[in-house]
Each structure stands twice: as C-alpha cells, then as structure tokens.
Amino acid sequence: MNFTLSEEQEMTRKMVRDFAEGKIQPRAVDIDVKAEFPEDIFKEMGELGLLGIPYPEEYGGSGGDTVTYALAVEEIGRVCGSTGLSYAASVSLGSSPIYQFGTEEQKQEFLIPLAQGKALGSFGLTEPNAGSDAGGTKTTAKTDGDDFIINGEKCFITNASYAKQIIVTAITGKDDRGKNIISAIVVPTDTKGVTITDNYDKMGVRGSNTAEIVLEDVRVPKANLIGDPDAGFKQFLQTLDGGRISIGALGVGIAQASLDRALAYAKERKQFGQSISNFQAIQFKLADMAMEVEMSRNIVLKAAWLKDQGKVFTKEAAMAKLYATETAFRSANQAIQILGGYGYMREYEVERYLRDAKLLEIGEGTSEIQRLVIARQLGC
Amino acid sequence: MNIYVLMKKTFDTEEKIQVSGGAIEQDGAEFIINPYDEYAIEEAINIRDEHGGEVTVVTVGDEDSEQQLRTALAMGADKATLINIEDDVEDGDQYTTSTILATYLKDQEVDLILAGNVAIDQASGQVGPRVADQLDIPYVTTITGITIDGEQVNIEKDVEGDVEKVQTSLPLLVTCQQGLNEPRYPSLPGIMKAKKKPLEELELDDLDLDEDDVEAKTETTDVFLPPEKEAGKVLEGEIDDQVKELVSLLRTEAKVL
C-alpha cells in the first residue's frame, strides 16, 4: 500500500494547478455568464499535452496514466466546471474508444489530432428517447455497399459544435435472438447531412458546449465503425466506465473548490465579535466537507489506479462517480450556506459550483444508474 | 553555448507562512522554484534554442530540491546539478552559497550564467554578483532584455522603472528581472522526458570544499513576521483640523516626523 504520487504525477498536478489558476480562473465567471466555449484555452491545453495524457507518444499523447489524467481533471474542475467537463468529455469519451477499440488506421486518422489537442472529441450516445436506457437507441446505420447510411437524432452532446468528428452510436443490425446490435461509428462533422445546433440554455457548465445533432442520410465508410461490429454495446459500456472516473475527478475538483472558498470565508467573516470559523455550527460543516472531499479523491484515484493496473474497475468507477459528484453538490450547497447572502451572488462563485455540480449527477450516467451498476456488481 | 542557471528552491510566499522558534516552519510549506529564477530558466532555454548549446540548472540545496530541478528539466533545460549540503552545512548564508557555486562553476566551461534578481524568501540579491566576482567575469543585474551577437551582448537593465542599455561581452553573469519574459508551463511531454535527463548530485567533498571553507559570514539572530496590519483611521471635521491632527498623529503615534 503506497499513497505517494510519482514525481511525474506530482509535477503534472502542480503544472495544471498553476495553469488553471493563472489562465482559467480569471475568466471562470465570464465563461459562465456569457456561456461561451473557451476555444483558446483548449488550444493552450492542447499545446501543454493535456488532451493526450493517457495515450502513448506514438499516437500524439503524453504517455501518462489514468491517475495523472484524473489529477489534471480535478485541477481544471477546481477552477472551472465548464472547462473541466469539455476536457473530460474529449479525452474519455471522444478519444478513448478509438484508442481502446480502433484500428491502426482509425488511430492514425482520428486519435492523433485529438491527443495532440488539434481537434476536440465528442461522443453521441444520448437520444431524445434513449437516456439511461441506452439500449433504446433509435438511430440506424444501414449498409450500402462499402458505406453506412446513418439516420437519427442525438441530444445533449458535449463538444459537438467544436468537434472534428463525433463517435455516434447506431443500430447496425439484429443478433441471433432478434435484439438490436448497437455499434459506435466515427462521423466527421463536415459530412453532408450532419446538422449540429447548440441552442440549449443550461443551468450550469454553461461554457461547455452542448449540442443537438440531426443525422439525415449521412454517408460514412464502413471502415469508420469502431471495434467489434457485434460487441459495440459492450465496448461503449467500457468507455463509460472510464468516463466515470474523470467525471468523479471533476466532482472532487468542485468539492475542493467549495471547501477552499468556504474555509477562507469562515476564517475572515466576523459575527458576534469573532470569526464564524470559531462556531461549531460552521466547523461541523467544514469538517464534513473536508472528510467527503478526501474520501471522494481516494475512491477516484483508486478507480484510476485499478484501470492503470489493468484490473476490473467497473464497480469502483461507479462508486467514484456517484460519491464524488454527490459530494460536489453537497459541498457547493454548504459553501453557499456558509457564505450566506454573498454565496448567493455570482461574483463569489460558489453558486456556480452548485449549478455545475448538478450536471455531474446527471451526465454520463445518473446517480441512480451508478447505484444500479454497483448493485449489479454486487450480484443483484 | 554553455549556459548555466543558478536556481533556488523557496517556499511559496502565497501560502501562509508560520514562524516558530526563530525559524520558518518547513512542514506543510509548499516549495517552488524561486519565481525570478523561472525567468532565468525561460531565458536560458530561449537563448539555447536560438544559438544552440546546452542549459544546465544548478542548485545548492537538499534532497528535496530535486523536484524543482526536475521541473526546470521539464521546462526544457538539458541537465541539472544538485549540490546537496544537507549533511554538511547547518546555517549557510549568501557567502556559503556563492562560494559553493563559484567553486563548482570554476571547473566548467561557462559562456553565460543566468540567475534570478533576488530570491523571494530572503531577497538578498547577492549570490549572483558574488559568484561573478569570484569567477572574475562581468555581471549585470535586473535585466529585462538580452540579445547576443557573437561575443557581444546587448542588455536592457531595469533601473527603478527606467531602462539602462548596457553593452558587454561573454562570458557573463546576469540576474533576471520581471518583464524579461513569460516563463512557460512545463508541458506534459516535457514532464515525461524530465526523468530521463541527467541529474548529477554532488556534495562539498566532490568540490574539494570543507565545511570551514563555506562557513557563514553572518549570523541570523531572529526571524519574525511583520506586525499584523491594523485597521486604518479616518479623520473627520474641518480640513485644517484634520491636517493638524494628521501631523500630530504622525509625530506622536507613528513617530515618522
């Protein structure tokens, strides 16, 4: 048992923290108010190699591991949930299916620009009638010679407006038992018939791009299908397992930020002639927040470590996502309570933490789905 | 071109600093590269990229200084040298550090040495100039610009907000001031490569130095935090009365008149 980070992990954490505090933090309020995707920040993150952390150098990556990646997501999330979410979605959902299941050609064509940060990744799974029930996917990909013709509609898709390509899930046929086979197919966004609109007016993570996609007779080569044509569904469940670690890390970041703000404020704020941090009512809140942040970070890093060791991490990833995101919501809520009237004001940022944290309990598998995943792992 | 950077590990003054028993609490303090040394590292890398050669970062410190050296390597320096004095020197001062550095540098082929203008912890600004003096090479402090053309070096130096232009030649030592450049963040590929770059560790013995040779010339008698800032006072009433009251307060309370 050894909880020490490696020198590279520690250095990465510090670099990302410096970058986040220096370049993102000053703009975090603005990114939220204007609901503008910070494209220039992603360009810089790409140049620093952040978008390719868990991928090998030969594919344009930095040759780091999942633990390093989780630390980076936490540090970005600590200053800006919007930037953190788009970052996590690009690396975990937009890139990892290609790295894990893609052919060499697909890696050369699609993964390298993503890992180098020259393109942003996106993963289109959710549909108007297929959310938690991903099996209810209606989008179809019909074979036509060497091509697929894709028709359907996707919604709530992170990064789609800024992505070079979207990995889209679609029904490609039926298995022996008559059940739909769902596969993942790379669709370049400039293909004819792809319409992307981002008119959502969101509660939180407002600077992260979220879009609706309509696919109308979209023709892509069959070679764009990722991995085993019969095991698409299984594959993207694995992708989602990995994504959960990063959303958990984002939760840790928001929870840590909530604690930092609340603690600093409690020490400065004077009522009844003394700092409110002297009052047990406040101390108990801060103690609970600190404990939950620590526990969240531990389970997130444990899930990341299991993944790095090549061990099964489905249960731990679900636990990490569930616990860390619910901690983020609770911590942000308590931070607002500690800051009182000030906490309710945008300028003090903690109200944004709450709005951002709420998304984490919904996206990439709701809290309820995480509980189902855990229960299934228990053998229920 | 052989470029050397003198680097110091300091505690992060943006974090809360605790003093106990006449010394700064090291436990729990965050340690960083002295920010002025970051300008030196950045400039050294840029000069190397333009003129070729090699950047070596040198520090006098302890085992933990390796982390700051690795960060410098991750930024793009080629080699690092840690002169570990943890077991040999108890209370060093600027004389100690500059003597050790000069002794080390005397055995190297040196074209250009860059250091920070000051370290943010003790802010003496002495080590750079003392090293240059011991090596008997010219030095220019607080530079905000440098261009090298053959042996000739043109420097812009910050003088209390004005710029002084200095022309000198290699070999040379400069100390770097804010405004010289914008230090880069170490990139992820840089961080991954840093571990494979050479990091040499030396002790006083390796430099043929005894503890007595580097014994501090000064003695620290006390370390204390500045007094906490008290709430200000707003004077009221007629302007004439306010002025009188202000003058009398400056004389009797603040004792600055």
Image (cartoon, helix red, strand yellow):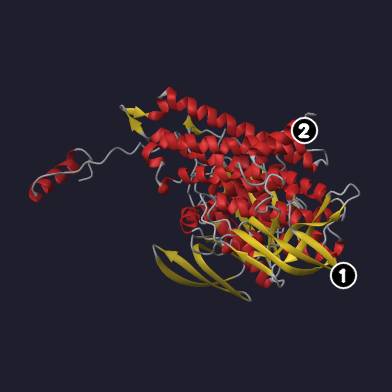
Say above or below: A318 vs B141: above
Say above or below: A22 vs A349: below
Q: Which mark is residue A375?
A: none
Task: Out of A130 and B168, give the one closest to the viewer.
Answer: A130
Residue to which mark 1 is pinned: A146
Residue B86 in view: no
Image coordinates of residue B196 in percent, x first then y, are 78, 52
Residue density around tag 1, few if under 14, some if 14–19, many if 20 or more, within 10 Å: few
Residue B6 in view: yes
Query: What is the C-alpha distance between the residues marked 1 and 2?
Result: 39 Å
Q: Quadrant of the C terminus of chain A?
A: top right
Disc 2 is placed on an element classified as helix
Q: Which mark is residue A376?
A: 2
Q: Residue furthest bottom?
A: B149
Q: Quadrant of the N terminus of chain A?
A: top right
Labels 1 and 2 touching (C-beta < 8 A): no
